[in-house]
Amino acid sequence: MVRLKSRYLLCEVCVSDRSNLLLLDDRAIYTAAKAAVARAHGDYGAALSSLGFSVKYLNAHTGIVFLRCRKSHYRLIWSALPFITSLENRGQRVPCFLNCLHVGGTIRTCQKFLVRYNTQQLHRMLPLCQSEGMRWSQIYFLLLFCTLLLFHCLS
Amino acid sequence: MAVFMDLNITYTTDKKRLRSVIETAAHLGYSTVAINYVVDLQQKKQEIGKPKCVSELFDTFPIVQGKSRPIKVLNRLTVVASRAAHFKPLREYKAYDLVAAYPKTETLFHAACMEFTIDIICVAATEKQPFFFKRSSVEGAIERGVFFEVSYTPAIRDSTMRRHTIANALNLMEACKGKNVIVTSGAGKPLELRGPYDIANLGLLFGLSEEEGKAAISTNCRAVHLHGEMRKTALGIVHSMKNEQPLTERQEEEDVPASKRAKIEMAQ
């Protein structure tokens, strides 16, 4: 039996100004990634990215993206991602870069990694929170995000 | 998780920008960074000054993503060399943790590989290399423990520079077969940095294999750091530490052999 194997690239969109993050949507990242691959690898890259490449999930609050590519070509597409310098959405340019955190074969493995990553982030950021209220809001926020992701993937 | 290092962050007099670059590097997972002071001795009135003290920048260094240690910041000097005479002053080099050279001609490249006391040789990223790499000089450098550096930020900024970077990098790979290469950013802004796994993958574009790409940002960088330390402390023999006598070669040749001396010290 032929099983279509894919690779999920778990990336984080890093912006200098957090409020700009909320403007992003998955179509912007899709077009930016396709354009970057086409620029870096030409017509071959453009053809590859039209095959099985999609943005599976985007969280505008934390900037986490899931990109899905075919297992045979994911390296090529991945090698073009560092060349993305900005994302465009409805005429507005947001300068940013994509930082790839993890490559997994299924969404479930990526999610396991993401939960661990978020707990690490929490440990890093909690000492920096100035007030008790901010701390609780951070924890609540991350918990909410994890459960949302689970629902989305299981549906 | 290996230790990732980024050994080239351009020095700017703007403290805030430098701080944000280092914070972004810590967020991305780099355990060590080096601030690069570029000196072009051909321009008049440029002297190799002392590097700024690292503790001026931060009170507490930002903690590296994924580890519990704060980020380590080193100082690095890059000398843009157009004449061999530029490498005379050795006293000022001691203040820097790493020393790099950017040779502009073939003879200088050969001399830098064989003779100069440096740690890193930079490969041009913004222009097409005017000379080819000779395998004899490159192999001599590898034997001595000098590393070749490819910088990726010009590739991100502009398309023609991207071509030059990739062309020069591929040229280098043919000569050195992937050994002794490090990949660094030349980041001046926090948005010009990229994560370590992305860079290991960029190594594929530069002609490195998957293993070599990962080594280029972790083990090779660590080797450069150690090479720099050895250069500072005269091959690791001279160390200055608090409340301990520095061991020099002369002292070791004295009557009391080292094992006996240790026993005497313990007995006291």
Image (spheres, rainbow, N blue to C red):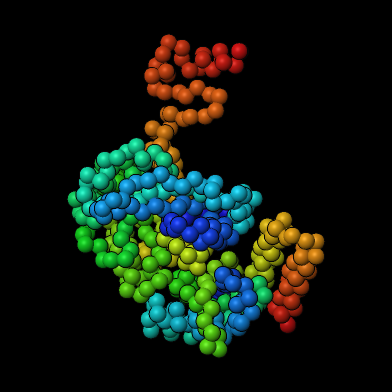
Give the residue at x 48% y 65%.
B189
Give the residue at x 74% y 76%.
A148
Count numbered badges in the picture: 0
Q: Name the outermost residue toward the bottom.
A: A90
Of A40 and B151, the residue lying toward us? B151
- Coordinates of residue B128 in the picture (x, y in percent): 26, 66
- Coordinates of residue B86 in the picture (x, y in percent): 25, 46
Of A127 and A44, the residue lying toward us? A127
- Coordinates of residue A73 in the picture (x, y in percent): 47, 75
Look at the picture and state if A108 lies above or below B179.
Answer: below
- Viewed as shown, does residue B180 lie left or right of B54? left
Of B23 and B134, the residue lying toward us? B23
- Viewed as shown, does residue B266 lie left or right of B46? right
- Viewed as shown, does residue B67 lie left or right of B184? right
- Viewed as shown, does residue A120 lie left or right of B34? right
Q: Tell me if residue A32 can be seen.
A: yes
Q: Name the outermost residue toward the top.
A: B255
Give the residue at x 46% y 47%.
B52
Q: Tell me if residue A106 can be seen.
A: no
Give the residue at x 51% y 61%.
B17
Q: In which quarter of the image is residue B205?
A: bottom left
- Coordinates of residue B41 in the picture (x, y in percent): 27, 51
Look at the picture and state if A122 lies above or below A77.
Answer: above
Q: Name the outermost residue toward the front.
A: B45
Q: In which quarter of the image is the C terminus of chain B?
A: top right
Q: In which quarter of the image is the N terminus of chain B?
A: bottom right
